[in-house]
Image (spheres, grey):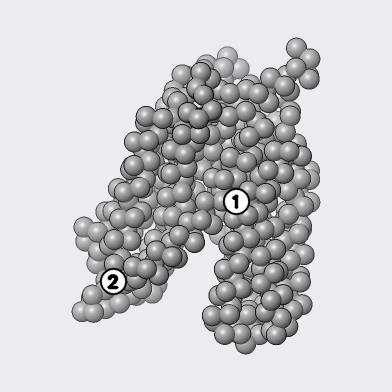
C-alpha cells in the first residue's frame, strides 16, 4: 500500500458502527454529548452551593468555614489527575463505552451523596473526591469514542463541539443559578445528577460497543510484546511527544487560569471600574471561547491540527492590548475580551489531535493523560504566579507571565507532529 493509499484509508476509516447511518452516528454522538455537557456542568456545583456552605446552620446553611469550602472543591480538582489514569486503564480493558457509562453513574451518584447529610464536612470531601476521580476520566474516554465513530475529516469539529460545552455549561449554570438562587440549592444539585443518568441510558442504547475493538487492540499490543499501558505508550519518539503535549496542556491551563482569575480584579482594583461593568466585559470572554472552539476545530479539520497554534499566539497579543487600554475604553475592553476568548478556543480540537498523535492501540489512554496531565503543571505553577501579584510587579507581572506562557506554548506546538491526513501506527 502506498503512503497516499494509507492516508486516504485512515482519513475515511470508521472503526465503530461501520454499518450505521449518519443519522444513527449523530444520535450516538448526542448521547455522549449529554454526558460530556454535564461533566462540564458538574464543575459549577461550587457556584451553586458555596454561599449556603459558609452560612451558619441556624440560618439554614452548612456552617462550614471558607477554608473548608475551598478544601472540598480543591480535593475534587486534585482527584481528576489519578482519575484520568485509572479510568484510562479501565477503558483499555473493558472498552470506552462501558467505562463512560460507569463514569457517568459514578459522578451522578457521588454528586447526590452529600444531600444525605449536607452539613457533614467529611462526607462532602469523600463524595467530591470520588466525583473528581470520575470527572478525570471523561475527556479521555468520550473523545476517542467519538473519534472512532467518525472519519478523521470530522473529528476536529466534533472534538471542538465537546470542548465548547464547557462554555455553554458556564452560561447555562449562571442563568439557572440566577433563576433559582441559593434557596433552591438542592434542586440545583439535582440538575447535575439526573441528566448524566439519562445520558448513560442513551449511550447504552445508541452508542456502538467497542469491547471487541478493545480486545483487538490488546491482541495487537501482545503481538508486539507489550501491554496497552502508559509505560508502553511512552516509548521511543512517543516519550518526547507525550511530554510535549502534557507541557502544552499545562501552558494552556496556566496562562488561561492566571488571566481569567485576575481579569476582573485588574479591572476593578487597578482601573477602578464598577463590578457590573467588569463582569460584562469578562462574560464576553466566555462567548468568544464558545465561538473560538468551534471555528478553530473547523480550521484544524481543514488545514491541519497545528494551525490553531496561531490562536495561542493571538491570545498573548490580546492580553498585551488588554493591558494598554484605559478604563474609559469600555467598548474596546469588550472587543478585546471577546478576542481573547476566541483565541483561547485554540484547544478545541486537542481531543482529536492528542488521540491521533499516538498509535491506535493507545487511543483509550492518550487523550486523557495528555490533556489532564497539564493540570499538574498549572496546579504547581499557579500559586507562584499569584505570588507575583503580591510583589512590586503586581498585575503587570502576572499578565506578562501569561503572555510569555502563551507564546512559549505556540512555539512548542510547532515542534509537535502534524496528524491530519497522516497514517497512524497500529
Which residue, given by chain and number where applicable, does mark 2 sit on?
183
Q: Quadrant where the N terminus lies?
A: top right
Query: Where residue 57 sits in the image (x, y, percent)?
Result: 23, 76
Which residue, given by chain and number where applicable, does mark 1 sit on?
374
Judge depth for marks 2 and 1 and give the one in front.
2
Query: Where residue 16 sits in the image (x, y, percent)?
Result: 52, 23
Badge 2 or badge 1: first in the primary sequence: 2
Note whether 227 is above or below 169 in the view shown: above
Residue nearer the viewer, 362 or 102: 102
Q: Quadrant of residue 45?
A: bottom left
Note whether 50 is above or below 304 in the view shown: below
Q: Residue furthest front?
A: 23
Quick one: label 2, few (<14), some, or many (20+) residues within 10 Å?
Answer: some
Note whether 232 is above or below 86 in the view shown: above
Q: Secondary structure at mark 1?
A: helix
Quick one: label 1, few (<14), some, or many (20+) residues within 10 Å?
Answer: many
Q: Quadrant where the C terminus lies?
A: top right
Amino acid at each position: 500500500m502506498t503512503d497516499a493509499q494509507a492516508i486516504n484509508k485512515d482519513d475515511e476509516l470508521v472503526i465503530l458502527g461501520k454499518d450505521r447511518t449518519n443519522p444513527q452516528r449523530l444520535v450516538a454522538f448526542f448521547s455522549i454529548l449529554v454526558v460530556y455537557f454535564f461533566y462540564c456542568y458538574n464543575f459549577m456545583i461550587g457556584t451553586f452551593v458555596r454561599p449556603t456552605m459558609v452560612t451558619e446552620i441556624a440560618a439554614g446553611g452548612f456552617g462550614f468555614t471558607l477554608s473548608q469550602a475551598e478544601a472540598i472543591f480543591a480535593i475534587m480538582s486534585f482527584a481528576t489527575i489519578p482519575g484520568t489514569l485509572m479510568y484510562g486503564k479501565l477503558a483499555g480493558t473493558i472498552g470506552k463505552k462501558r467505562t463512560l457509562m460507569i463514569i457517568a453513574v459514578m459522578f451522578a451518584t457521588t454528586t447526590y451523596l452529600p444531600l444525605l447529610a449536607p452539613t457533614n464536612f467529611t462526607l462532602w470531601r469523600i463524595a467530591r473526591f470520588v466525583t473528581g476521580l470520575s470527572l478525570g476520566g471523561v475527556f479521555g474516554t468520550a473523545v476517542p469514542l467519538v473519534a472512532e465513530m467518525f472519519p478523521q475529516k470530522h473529528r476536529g469539529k466534533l472534538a471542538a463541539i465537546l470542548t465548547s460545552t464547557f462554555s455553554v455549561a458556564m452560561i447555562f449554570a449562571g442563568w439557572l443559578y440566577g433563576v433559582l438562587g441559593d434557596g433552591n440549592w438542592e434542586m440545583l444539585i439535582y440538575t447535575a445528577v439526573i441528566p448524566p443518568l439519562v445520558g448513560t441510558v442513551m449511550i447504552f442504547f445508541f452508542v456502538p460497543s467497542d469491547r471487541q475493538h478493545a480486545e483487538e487492540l490488546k491482541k495487537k499490543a501482545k503481538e508486539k510484546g507489550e501491554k496497552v499501558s502508559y509505560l508502553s505508550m511512552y516509548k521511543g519518539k512517543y516519550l518526547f511527544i507525550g511530554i510535549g503535549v502534557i507541557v502544552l496542556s499545562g501552558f494552556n491551563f496556566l496562562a488561561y487560569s492566571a488571566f481569567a482569575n485576575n481579569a476582573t480584579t485588574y479591572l476593578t482594583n487597578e482601573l477602578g471600574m464598577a463590578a457590573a461593568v467588569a463582569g460584562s466585559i469578562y462574560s464576553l470572554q466566555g462567548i468568544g471561547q464558545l465561538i473560538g472552539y468551534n471555528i478553530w476545530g473547523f480550521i484544524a479539520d481543514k488545514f491541519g491540527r497545528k494551525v490553531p497554534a496561531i490562536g495561542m499566539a493571538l491570545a498573548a497579543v490580546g492580553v498585551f492590548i488588554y493591558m494598554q487600554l484605559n478604563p474609559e475604553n469600555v467598548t474596546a475592553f469588550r472587543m478585546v475580551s471577546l478576542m481573547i476568548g476566541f483565541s483561547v478556543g485554540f484547544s478545541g480540537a486537542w481531543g482529536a489531535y492528542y488521540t491521533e498523535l499516538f498509535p491506535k492501540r493507545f487511543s483509550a489512554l492518550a487523550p486523557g493523560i495528555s490533556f489532564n496531565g497539564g493540570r499538574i503543571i498549572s496546579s504547581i505553577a499557579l500559586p507562584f504566579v499569584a505570588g507575583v501579584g503580591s510583589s512590586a510587579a503586581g498585575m503587570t507581572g502576572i499578565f506578562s507571565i501569561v503572555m510569555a506562557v502563551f507564546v512559549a506554548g505556540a512555539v512548542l506546538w510547532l515542534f509537535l507532529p502534524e496528524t491530519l491526513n497522516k497514517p497512524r501506527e497500529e
